Every structure is written in structure tokens, then in C-alpha cells.
Image (cartoon, grey):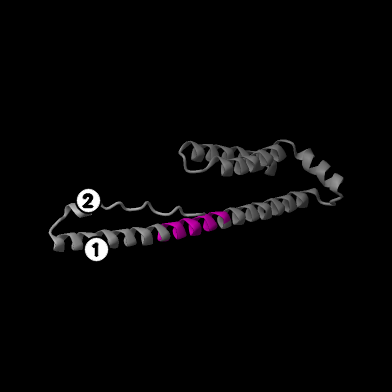
Amino acid sequence: MTPLLTAALLGVGTALVILYLVRRDQMHGRYAFWWLSVATVALVFGLMPSLVDRLGHWFGVKYPPTLVVMLVLAALLVKLLVSDLDVTRRERRIRRLLQKTAILEAELRELRTEVDALRNAASHSGDESDVAAVVVEPPRKVVG
């Protein structure tokens, strides 16, 4: 098997695996697009080896296969950067949601304490209808 055929088969195999993962809802479309692009590039380089030579000549690289390695490394660095940005965004969102949840839990505890105090006061006075008549103000809006 030639390296070119291997590259083409890797491209097709990668595309099939990615499409399977998307279909099984195990990979989000945004990530699938990235991997399908990688598979397409591998397939194109496998089917058209002269393209690597032409690109190498155009970029002034003496040994064109090193251009492929450099492009792969550059693509991996871009992918890592995008992944780090995505993780940072998600962590920020999770932190904000945790803060909002903590605020809401504190307000809920406060409201329960007030209701319990009113129930105790009503049970000592003998008139529990006071508890039902109490209007509890709605929780304050959480800004976020």
C-alpha cells in the first residue's frame, strides 16, 4: 500500500467515523465540521499527491512532505487554541450559573426562615390563617 493510498483511506475512514459519531449524537456539529475538514484535506492530499509538490514549490519548501507536517502542526495549534477558548467560555458560564444558584439558594433559605417564623408566630397565637394571608415578595432578579 502506498503512502498516498494510506492517506486517502485515512481521510475516508476519519470522515466515516465522524459522521457515525454525529449520527449517534456523540459529537456536536461544530466539532464534526473541523474533523470532516481534516478528513477532506487528507483525502485530497492522498488522491492528488502532485498538489503537495506544487504547494511545497509555491511556499519554497525543498522537501514538500515537510510542508504537510508543518500544516498539520499549525492546524493542531489552531485547534488547541479554539478548544482552550471554548473551555474558558464554558468555565466562565458555569461559574456564573453557580453564583446565580448560590444567590437563589440563599434567598430560598431566607424565605423559608421567614415562613417558618410566621408559622411559629401564628401557631403561638392560635390563628393559623395569618400564615396563609402573608404575601411573600417575589425573589429579586439576579443580574448576570
Judged from the image, the secondary structure of the residue bearing numbered disc 1 is helix
Segment tinted magenta in the rendering = 89-102
Q: Which residue is mark 1?
A: 117
Tell which of 104 and 94 is nearer to you.
104
**Would you say residue 72 sits in the magenta stretch?**
no
Residue located at (42% from left, 60% from top) = 103
- Looking at numbered disc 2 in the image, what kind of residue is underneath it? Ala
Judged from the image, the secondary structure of the residue bearing numbered disc 2 is helix
Q: Which mark is residue 7?
A: none
Tell which of 141 and 136 is nearer to you.
136
Residue located at (48% from left, 36% from top) = 23
Q: Is residue 126 above or below residue 65?
A: below
- Looking at numbered disc 1 in the image, what kind of residue is underneath it? Ala
Tell which of 99 and 24 is nearer to you.
99
Residue 10 in view in this figure:
no
Indicate the position of residue 128 as horizontal and vertical percent values.
16, 55
Residue located at (49% from left, 59% from top) = 95
**Would you say residue 101 sits in the magenta stretch?**
yes
Q: Which residue is mark 2?
A: 132
> Of marks 1 and 2, which one's residue comes earlier in the chain?
1
Secondary structure that dominates the magenta span? helix
